[in-house]
Image: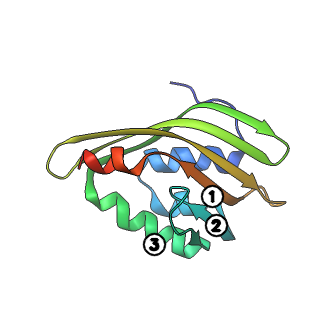
Amino acid sequence: MTFPAMPKSVLQFFTASQAADADAWADSFAETATFHDPVGEKPIEGREAIRTFIKSVIPNFDPFLGLTPLEAHTVGNSVAVSWRGAAVALDSKPVNWSGINVYEIDENGLISEAKAYFNRAIFESQL
């Protein structure tokens, strides 16, 4: 599957998720970025906190298959991407979820803010 065109840091966000590479995933964010995962939860502040969060999630799955972007829409420094996620829980249960992320890109081309819109209850009900 080919990915839709999007800014390099957003593309890195998705490719790193599929590689289950927490460092590359976190490095798509600016040093002082904010990550709302999902919107409505307390935001994660700063690249290192985002890295810690990602590193806490990936080991709960075998494998973590990541997020696949379906459509991307860029207007100025804002990007909206619809996606689907997939993983296999440690008890071998498949986990599938989907959503839309909205990204703000800073002057260095990194993600300064990411807002993930998905239903956490649907995700958690599969675990």
> Cβ–Cβ below 8 Å for labels 3 and 1?
no
**Rendered image: mark on residue 63:** none
Q: Mark 3 or 1 closer to N-term?
A: 1
**Rendered image: mark on residue 34:** 2
Q: Relative to residue 6, is residue 121 drawn left or right? A: left
Q: Relative to residue 17, is residue 95 drawn left or right? A: left
Q: Quadrant of residue 31?
A: bottom right
Disc 3 to disc 1, how far (Cα)? Answer: 14 Å
Disc 1 to disc 2, how far (Cα)? Answer: 12 Å
Disc 2 to disc 3, how far (Cα)? Answer: 13 Å
**Rendered image: mark on residue 28:** 1
**Mark 2 burial class by Cα count in 10 Å: few <14, some 14-19, many 20+:** many
Q: Quadrant of residue 65?
A: top left
Q: Mark 1 or 2 closer to N-term?
A: 1
**Colouring scheme, one of rainbow, by chain, secondary structure, one colour:** rainbow
Residue 120 locus on image (x, y percent): 40, 51
Residue 95 locus on image (x, y percent): 29, 41
- In this view, the residue in front, 18 or 117, is 117
* Residue located 60% across and 71% down the image: 47
Tell me if residue 45 comes above or below residue 107 in the rendering. below
User: Callout 1: helix, strand or loop?
Assistant: loop
Q: Mark 2 or 3 closer to N-term?
A: 2
For badge 2, the amino acid type reads: Thr
